Image (cartoon, grey):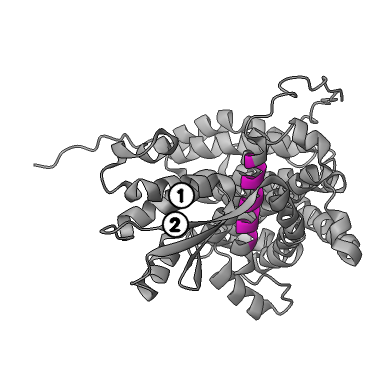
Amino acid sequence: MNEPSIEKVVPEEDFCTLLEERAVALLETCAAPGGAAWTKRRFFDLSVEADELEAFLDDYGARTNRRFSAFTEIVASIRGFALTGLSLIHLVRRVASYGVLESLGDRRVAALDDLGLALQFTEAKLAGLMRALLDEGRSIGVTHLTQGEGHPPLDRTVRRFRLPHNVDLDRIEDEEQRIAEVASKYLAAVELLQKVKIRPILDEQEREAFMHSRCSEVDARVWESTVHNLQSSYDTYVKNTVLETGDPRLKTLRGHISAALHTLEAVTRLTHFVERHEGCLRSDTADVALQGIVPRHEVRDVTLNRLLVWAWAFIEHGKDLASSLLPSYTNASEATLQLREGIILHARPASLVVAVVQHHGTPVELEVAGTVCNAGSILEIMVAIGSNPEAREYLVRGDERPLRDLVALFAADLGEAGLEALPDSLGYLRR
């Protein structure tokens, strides 16, 4: 016996009445006069209104309904382009204050031009999507509005002032180590993006192939989250500290991070838009409509040649700055580690070595019989040990804090007697 469906099918006309009520805020914004007046507030309002409406449409399965699918996809696209515009307008307005443009030398003007053009592209395509939503809304009977008939956006004048920073300015607690960690993470981000071999590509077919193979949405999200985590670490542990106040390099490094982050936010959103509409839409009508408003090859061009290349430039040109910070905030040292008779550096104790290095967040080199490896990588350690199985002595180089803990770890026979037998200074390995 067939069980009845737990979902009630809503007649399209009944849903149309519901949608007309829920869509009014976004449709009024799309129909507002003065369409060229793009502000951060307008991008933000559009993104919020579109996000709320998209969630409502998805709750009712509008994306898979022939009548409402195109409307739903246009709403989703408006949300994505509004968020892109929000990142870019913030970047364009503030990049001069980040202190990163000087590092670009003769490329400074080109960077500003490309970021400005990317913002203009986003504004133009967003305006087209807003007109298309009004057209689609009239065709399915959820609005009568046309461009210019909506309510103008509210004038939200922001009063610019700032309270004095006077909380915890005198607290110096492991700040030097935190700065060294941020610098190390920055260099890791440089290495991550360097492998992508980002470069301008004017030929459309070559560019499409590069973006498919090197810049998928998954890739873009990894890059964005890496830089976002980097900025979060800086803001949590370094921002507004005594050391930041006294070392101008720190704020400049923060500027490189912020410029790259806002650019990568836009890259992620535009990459998502392209991939979402490359064979993923269930409605051919929606796909054709969107391709006419926002051609995907144009989005790819802007994503790579006006955004991603500068995200890489912002990160790359901060490399020397990050490298200069490490010796300033670490006490470079080296130590010899000796294995006691009967103790072997196999995978489990090697993982403890990695945990010590990662806990401190600064790079440590491990040398085994002339083979040098990264002590923060279990793979590199195992390869080095496997290449020199008879070695009983190891040389480590890096900041004195992780080296001190590695000496203690080897003195405790690498935890082979159990983690409970480790000294209190290594208590973090038991967590």
Q: In terms of secondary structure, where does tag 1 sit? A: helix
What is the magenta range?
177-190
Q: Position of residue 266 (x, y in %)?
A: 68, 52
Where does residue 138 sit, x and y in percent of width and height?
Answer: 63, 43
The answer to whether any part of residue 317 appears in the image is: yes
Closest to the camera, between mark 2 and mark 1, is 2
Residues marked 2 and 1 touching at CB (< 8 Å): yes
Q: Report the magenta stretch's main SS.
A: helix
Say what amino acid the circle numbered 2 marks: Leu
Kindly identify which residue carries mark 2.
Answer: 337
Instruction: Residue type at mark 1: give it.
Output: Leu
The N terminus: image quadrant: top left
Give the labeled residue for mark 1. Answer: 406
Left or right for 76, reference 244: left
- Going 46% across and 49% down the picture, which residue do you hit? 406
Name the quarter where the C terminus is drawn: top left
The outermost residue toward the left is 1
Residue 86 percent coordinates (x, y): 72, 43
Q: Nearer the viewer, residue 126 or 83?
A: 83
* Apparent side of residue 105 relative to residue 69 in the rendered image (left or right): right
Within the magenta stretch, is there residue 183? yes
